[in-house]
Image (tube, rainbow, N blue to C red):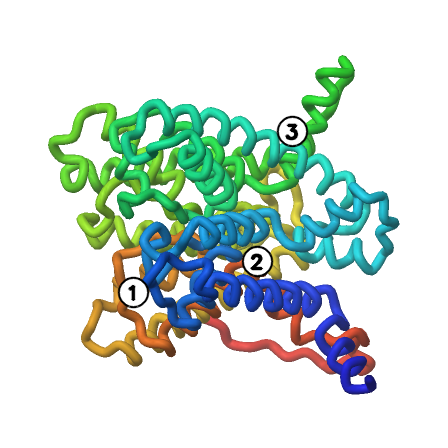
Amino acid sequence: MKLLKRIKKILFVTPARTILTIYLLFTLVGSFLLWLPISLKPGVKLDFIDAVFIAVSQISSTGLSPVSQADTFSLIGGVISIIIIQVGGLGIILLVASYWVIIGKKIGIKERNIIAAEQNQFSVKGIIKLITNAVIAIFAFQAIYIVSMTLYIYIAQPFSASFGESLFHALYLAASSFANAGFDFLPTNNSFVVFRGQVFPQVMTMIIVFVGGVGFWPLAEFTLWIKAKIRKTKHKISFITKLLVTSHFLFWIISALVYFVMEYENSMKGQSLTNIFLDVFFMSNSARSAGFYNTDITKWTEATRLFYSMLMFIGAAPNSSGGGIRMTTFFLLASGLISFGRHRKQVFFAGKAIKDVAVRKSYMVFALGIILVMFSTLLVSIIEPNRWSIMEVGFEISSAFGTAGLSLGLIPYLSVWSKLIFIVNMFIGRIGILTAVAILENKKETTNVVTYAEIDMLVG
């Protein structure tokens, strides 16, 4: 009994450790369920390390996989995958909190602190209202997507033989698209290439991928805005929502322009205007965090791969289903460098002065992210000598850390040790670097009792 209490104290002593423990337990359960014969097609065997890899990839909304989902898993395995992807996209803590709200359970300050930690909130104030309204918007968007895509697949796609099969594909794509996971159960095994030249499914998926990557805060405010319209009252959109939506949209447009310039004379050469339009906007939206693709990315130039490695490293918005260092971290980093260059005492971003602690966090997240990705790339290159170029390995590692899911086809051929490195990157990309660092904290806060004399130091 004392041992159990000791273990519980270690694993759940802080919000960060609680989040890590819950995600680890859920991952183990998901891995075991996917590994069971009932989840696999007749005659198919799956190594447990691959089941763990897939479960981590699904819960982290990554999309990397050593096996084909459609060729490996049965209908039961597909349903289990949908649940894991949906839970990963929404967040386990958010789902549990939503359940507490539905059953009317009183949520204490400890639970609110855990929710705030997972959702990257500044404080616990209004956290329950945030998640309630965010969940309403999430399921509303998914419901529209499921209905429209079910009808489209059933009517227009030859790979779906029945309405039930069309519904299953729509459910799978809805969960995967919102979670920015990039998984699909399509029998063609080539992601959205099966919808090449078809405007409706690609535009619908672009919308829900954007919604999933923009963050839960804007979704909650969207619900409040709709409620205000119905009640004929006013709701003022907050600064953080405007920032997240605007920056997410700007990233989309800028990456689309860069992608067009770099690939127009390469992968887009000879394509119709419709395909070029869809390629540019679908890939620039999906590749950064979702991992779906509608073109052969192995034909990309080295420059394009490097560009998208950087985009995947940056990732989506904080408080969203995407990974990476997050967009706001990148903007704070850039703003901090500009302020330092102009000898400003404060860092300004979007007309606001940013707290120094937030700026220092952005530097730490960026530095640790770079170290993790570079060190992981080095390790995999050592473990898998002379198999792939450093650029190819770096692309895959960036995809894992950014939970993006784009792949050049390396994953099925990785050794066990390389797979473990990818698993670590996907897991950290999902829970976030700050949460990963906070795991080292204990409950007792430490402060500097003694103040030491400061010295200057040569830098640069």
Instruction: Note whether residue 209 is visible.
Output: no
Q: For the image shown, how many numbered marks are present on the structure? A: 3
Q: Amino acid at mark 1?
A: Pro
For numbered disc 2, what is the local secondary structure?
Answer: helix
Residue visible at 74% across and 46% down? 99
Describe the element under mark 1 as helix, strand or loop: helix
In this figure, which residue is indicated by the disc labeled 1?
Answer: 412
Compared with residue 451, is residue 393 higher up or lower down, i.e. above or below?
above
The local secondary structure at tag 3 comes to helix
The residue sitting at the front extreme is 42
Of marks 2 and 1, the one in the foreground: 1
| Residue 12 pos. (x, y %) | 74, 71
Q: Position of residue 418 (x, y in %)?
A: 36, 74
Examine the rendering and report whether any part of residue 85 can be seen.
yes
The amino acid type of the residue labelled 2 equals: Ser
- The percent position of residue 405, horizontal first and vertical second, equals 39, 53
Query: Residue farthest to the top?
Result: 232
- Check disc 2: other Cα within 10 Å, few if <14, some if 14-19, many if 20+: many
Residue underneath mark 3: 222
**Residue 172 placement, left or right of 230:** left
Give the alpha-carbon distance from disc 2 to disc 1, as whole Å: 34 Å
- Give x and y (percent) for residue 305: 27, 53
Q: In percent of the image, x 46 and y 41: which residue is there?
A: 177
